[in-house]
Image: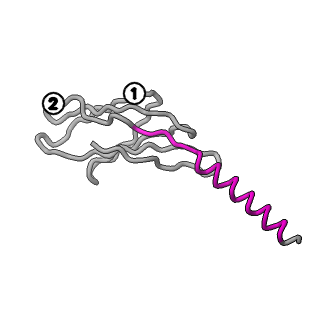
């Protein structure tokens, strides 16, 4: 009988943990795009939709050649990039990082343009 009570308590605890973990929703990036360009420069812009955990920063990556941390607490952000190779295409990946008091800093979903 005590084993059944312990098993039931464990089950209730696990259901509660699962429910809390699945309801947390980090923020995400929308409308990530290049909005302007010049010789060797571009402007990237995006919107941020807030979630449960506070945004710490973004990391912008072009191939493996360029990695840049961006701090923008606004709902609409932009990042001018200069000194790029002219006429060379590239894929940019923008990753938001969040802070969770219990689990520390973690990466959100990557946006690509």
Pick the residue in front: 101 or 26. Answer: 26
Secondary structure beneath label 2: strand
Where residue 98 appears, as percent x and y from the top left, is: 52, 43
Quick check: is 6 in the magenta stretch?
A: yes
Q: Residue at 43% of width from left, 33% of height from top?
A: 48
Pick the residue in front: 28 or 37. Answer: 28
Labels 1 & 2 near each other (Cβ < 8 A) = no
Against 49, is 89 above or below? below
Quick check: is 71 in the magenta stretch?
A: no
Tag of residue 38: 2
Q: Quadrant of the N terminus?
A: bottom right
Where residue 105 appears, as percent x and y from the top left, is: 54, 48
Q: Quadrant of the C terminus?
A: top left
Q: Nearer the viewer, mark 1 or mark 2?
A: 1
Q: Residues within 10 Å of mark 1 (few under 14, many from 20)?
A: some
Tag of residue 76: 1
* Of callouts 1 and 2, the N-terminal one: 2
Question: Which colour style is shown?
Answer: one colour
Q: Residue at 28% of width from left, 45% of height from top?
A: 92
Q: Residue at 70% of width from left, 53% of height from top?
A: 16
> What's the CA distance linking mark 1 and mark 2?
22 Å
Where residue 72 appears, as percent x and y from the top left, is: 43, 31
The magenta stretch is: 4-29
């Amino acid at each position: 009988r005590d084993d059944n009570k312990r098993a039931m308590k464990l089950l209730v605890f696990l259901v509660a943990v699962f429910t809390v973990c699945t309801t947390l929703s980090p923020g995400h990036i929308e409308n990530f795009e290049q909005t302007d360009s010049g010789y060797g420069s571009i402007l990237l812009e995006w919107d941020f939709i807030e979630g449960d955990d506070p945004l710490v920063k973004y990391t912008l990556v072009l191939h493996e050649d360029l990695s840049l941390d961006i701090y923008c607490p606004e709902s609409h952000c932009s990042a001018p990039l200069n000194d790029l190779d002219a006429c060379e295409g590239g894929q940019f990946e923008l990753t938001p990082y969040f802070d969770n008091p219990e689990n520390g800093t973690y990466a959100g979903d990557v946006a690509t343009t």
